Amino acid sequence: MYHYQEYKSDIRLTPWIENYWLATDFVPSGIYAKVLPDAYADIIFDFDSTKGISRATIFGTMTNFFEVDSTKHTQMFGIRFKPAAITAFTRVPQMELTNRSVELALLETLFDKSFYETFPEKQSAQEIIAHTNNHLIKMLPHLYSPDVQILRAVDVINFTKGQLNLTRLASDICLSQRHFERRFKTAIGVSPKMFAKIIRFTHTIQDIVKYPEKDLLTIALERGYYDGTHLMKEIKSFSGDTPTDVRKKREVYYAPDECYV
């Protein structure tokens, strides 16, 4: 396993950055930590224990879980962008990155040569975060204009925790269903329906882990699932486990609100 900690960005970056995170102290344990779909795009700097170097990778919106092998890493630092926010820094359509990880150097880069050259010199979390904050703040005057209608839709989906009528939402933001789907996929990487499902799943999985005494059918109905079978199928699809398995293996699932500084 490993130690995981989340950090706030500079307040000037909060419209775009959800958080920074740092994973350290990787120890082979035979237990693979699961990374679940969460509707965010991440840029990850990975210090590989087998190669002794760092590499930068951009992860698009994921609709599938993947597992972290602790034997292959020494340290990982991530920049987690809010939904659609990374499009302010790059013009790459996010649907090209869905369920993919691509070396940042192969795309329009957010970081210049000086950033990469000095990044490995940073030893503490505070130094790494300050270095990243300084670079991204310098980019603020040059950001691309966001798709404000899609940002509004994202806010509504988040506020309702994924439980809403998406046809009505498209109408509310003055878009036809076809244009809503197309622009949403360009900015987020997935359809509005899939995004809403991921948001609902995220809240549901937290309930399952945080409230082990709570009946699963009650959670299912509270989160807008038809019944326990519907809940089980969706949890299995996104996490690879049944709700009961999630509770048994709760140590491999992390609750985001429990490790934030």
Image (cartoon, rainbow, N blue to C red):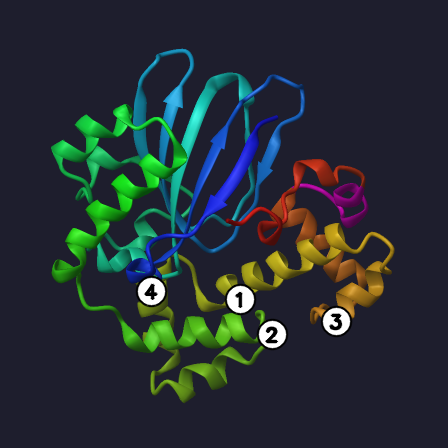
Q: Distance between the residues labelled 2 and 3?
A: 10 Å
The answer to whether residue 155 is left or right of residue 55 is right
Residue position marked by numbered label 3 in the rendering: 222
Quadrant in which residue 31 is drawn = top right
* Residue 246, x across and y down, in percent: 74, 44
Q: Of marks 1 and 2, which one's residue comes earlier in the chain?
A: 2
Kindly indicate whether the residue at mark 1 contacts the one at mark 3 (C-beta within 8 angstroms).
Answer: no
The answer to whether residue 167 is left or right of residue 79 is right
Disc 1 on helix, strand or loop? helix
Residue type pointed to by label 3? Glu
Q: Distance between the residues labelled 1 and 4?
A: 20 Å
Does the magenta stretch mainly form a helix, a strand or a loop? helix
Q: Which residue is nearer to you in this view: 118 or 116? A: 118
Q: Of marks 2 and 3, which one's residue comes earlier in the chain?
A: 2
Disc 2 on helix, strand or loop? loop
Residue position marked by numbered label 1 in the rendering: 196
Task: Identify the residue at horizontal 31%, vertical 17% (top origin).
Answer: 53
Front position among marks 1 and 4 = 4
Q: Which mark is residue 15?
A: 4
Region rendered in magenta:
240-247
Q: Distance between the residues labelled 4 and 2?
A: 24 Å
Front position among marks 4 and 2 = 4
Q: How far apart are marks 1 and 2 (CA)?
A: 7 Å
Front position among marks 4 and 3 = 4
Q: Does the magenta stretch include residue 36?
A: no
Q: Which mark is residue 163?
A: 2
